[in-house]
Amino acid sequence: MTVTPHKARPMVAVENLRVIAHADDGREIPLVDDIRFTVQKGEVLALIGESGSGKTTIALALMGYARHGCHIAQGTIHVAGTDVTSQTPAQLRQFRGNKVAYIAQSAAASFNPAMKILDQVVEPVVIHKVMSRAEAEKKAIALFRELALPQPDTIGQRYPHQVSGGQLQRLMTAMALISDPEVVILDEPTTALDVTTQVEVLKTFRRVVRQRGMTAIYVSHDLAVVAQMADRILVLLKGAIAEYGTTGDLLRAPQAEYSHLLLEAAKQKVRPSPWRPEDATLQPMLEVRDLFAGYGPVDKHGQPKTPILHDINLRLYRGQAMGIIGESGSGKTTLAHAIAGMNKPCGGHILFNGHYIAGEMQQRSENELRRIQYVFQMADTALNPAHSVETLLARPLTFFHGLRGAARQKRIAQLLELVRLPASVLTRRPWALSGGQKQRINLARALAAEPDLILCDEVTSALDTVVAAAVLDLITDLRRELGLSVIFISHDLHAVRSVCDEILVVKNGRMVTQVVRADYDKPSSELYYERLKRAVPELRQGWLDEHNDIAL
Amino acid sequence: MNLLTLPWRFFLSLTASGKTGLSITLIWIALAVFGASLAPYKLEDIGVGPMFGGVSKDFWFGTDYLGRDMVSRILYGARYSIGLALGAALLASLVGTLLALLAAVAGRWLEEILGRINDAMLVLPGKILALMIVAVFGSSLPMLIVTAVFTYWPGAFRIAWAMASSLRSMDYVRASRLRGESRFYIAVHDILPNMLHPMLTDFGLRFVYIVLLLSGLSFLGLGVQPPYADWGTLVRENLQGLFDGSPAVLAPALAIASLTIGANLFIDSLQAMRPLTPAKGVA
């Protein structure tokens, strides 16, 4: 731990912070314990750690707030010359918004959809009677300009649904900055955004922080993003400090074991593939020809109401892993749904093992259903919360293979071993498992069918970096052990590169380009792919300042 | 986890008002079951005390217009008030839930038909409908249950349907569909267990409504017929005692009030408890 002697009085000083929650039976559960850090004026401190490590709890405690059922039990918190823990609720209300501002993860959920944006942006200062309305509106428009929003004079007259996600996040920043707060807390501000949008927003944050000399607390789970933003990093593990030091030191020579893991996971090493391009001479296992699909009722010309995918062609060989990548709304998931039979294509064909298969799952045979398995993005919603892990895994075994009794138990044990889970999880329900464990059960359920192909729909995007890396390792191992073919859908180019033999880039429902593993690092003539590639933050300081976007 | 201590741990996890409510409800249910053997007098012991007698050592809640002991009358009546309401609430919730499940998995046509029938039922005022049914078909115990079920199943259907239709688009239901599971399996294994909790809460509220409906019908003389009496009948029988401040009219009214308030307190505390269950939000 490196602690430099502070000359000036720190802007934020936290000592011995302990926040506890009360369990149903009255026990006290510490959420964070013995947290101490200081942030000087103009510094950016990042809080990093997996979900449940107490990042947001600390960030909220800085504003004197604890979530329902929790409270700040111990410690001193000084923010901008205010002792937060000794404030009355009325004083806290004055303090929040004026001296410290909070930018939440999902701007879309934080804006009132029924109010014009400008009215919401000026609301904090008008309520606190710091400025007159006219002054506030003028300042807001100046902020919109500063944050590089398009049409700064009129964008405030729109409603939240009329602007994009990245713009909304910047508008929320304007809302936070309008009262000239001394400390800004950013809670995973770019997690919900696409990579290309993320770069824009990060650049804006970076510029504003520099120009205004703002003190900021940046909460994130993404080390590469944090490396661009922060001067110091506080690594949290299970509510306690794992490591605290400058960004440079942490990236170069991490001390704690967990920091090593984080760094390792963020590097996204290339995982060896068991598949060789020479194997592609055989008949492809899955072939998609001229696929055309969309949503809504089909009119008399065979056009769906909302067409999504056009002219998709792909060939997937046995044992191969293909990545499908694109921004949100590009049609990646629609393509996977079409292959799985959840969304009947309006045109084109799907061939599986050389045979045409029906577009609708109801018309597919049991064997076809078994051979193509779909792994859903959110393990939380993909596992029935009313069933135990044993029931979840037993059902496909009984359904597809007619296994019962001891044979079934044996197979369940094998499956758990395959996804590296202990047998003790069998009796638990999904909500008693961690996110990574749930995703493993989700995979195990697909494997229970003994499929030829699994469709992984953003399986790692809801997971923490370290856990996600472990799941990617698992998928790679499974390919080697079982000879599985995988279609891997993601917006995370690094993850896709590290596991897939081939990448299919989709934009607005059309294939843009197809890149094989050997060409990943070569510059591509396809600008869109190049742009995606460059937008993924790299794990070194100063990447953001070097990054220049390609105009499309 | 020890299954035997589960009810006790559940009781401890309730709020103070929830504990009070549950205790009152349980005491009434116990009295309904064992009331007949606990009652100090027989149901038809006419004239064991004075007419509209006050509270005394022999008659804790006084006596009614025929000099019968009110404590015994209320204990016998609990069987009708609670038993009928419990049966009717159970049936109404079951009918509503099962039809909603059917509508959720059986496809567009059945869904539309059941939904529109349900809408039509919902716009009919419940009390008037109940009065009409009793007026046309007469009053008997089975008929009263049928009336209550008929009046209250649409509400249960509405809630169950809303739940089932949101649950059927969950990923785990889609996963089952992708596996090629039958509609029956999806309804029984995937949808039903996950709507059980809210439906139990709804059942509690429905029970309270039905107690009030049946008491109301009895008060109008259309419910349980003499010499048997539920609490609504008891209020009506002794109405003339109201102006003398006789406890005979107050006691059954208090019984109705305490039962409904108790059940409501319990249900409300369940709703307040829900955010503390381990359902975690999306990270």
Image (spheres, coloured by chain):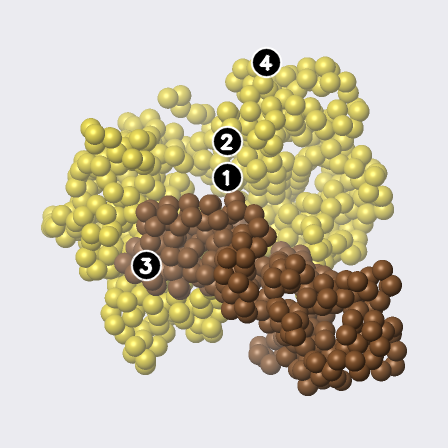
C-alpha separation, residue under disc 2 versus residue under disc 3? 38 Å
Q: Looking at the image, do the residues carrying marks 2 and 1 touch, with CB atoms under 8 Å apart?
A: yes
Crowding near pointer 4: few (<14 within 10 Å), some, many (20+)? some
Q: Amino acid at mark 3?
A: Arg
Which element carries disc 3, helix, strand or loop?
helix
- Tell me what residue is drawn at x 72 percent, y 75 percent: B73
Q: Looking at the image, do the residues carrying marks 2 and 4 touch, with CB atoms under 8 Å apart?
A: no
Do the residues marked 3 and 1 share a common chain?
A: no
Q: Amino acid at mark 4?
A: Asp
Which element carries disc 2, helix, strand or loop?
helix
Q: Amino acid at mark 1?
A: Ala
- Please identify the quarter of the rendering in which residue A107 is found: top right
Q: Which mark is residue A165?
A: 2
Indicate which label's residue lies in the foreground, 3 or 1: 3
- Tell me what residue is drawn at x 61 percent, y 51 percent: A235
Do the residues marked 2 and 4 share a common chain?
A: yes
C-alpha separation, residue under disc 2 versus residue under disc 1? 8 Å
Q: Amino acid at mark 2?
A: Gly
Q: Which mark is residue B183?
A: 3
Q: Which mark is residue B241?
A: none
Where does the C terminus of chain A fall, quadrant-wise?
A: top left
Indicate which label's residue lies in the foreground, 2 or 3: 3
In this structure image, what is the colour of chain B?
A: brown
Do the residues marked 4 and 3 share a common chain?
A: no
C-alpha separation, residue under disc 1 versus residue under disc 4? 27 Å
C-alpha separation, residue under disc 2 versus residue under disc 4? 19 Å
Q: Which mark is residue A153?
A: 4
- Please identify the quarter of the rendering in which residue A105 is found: top right
Does the image show residue A314?
yes
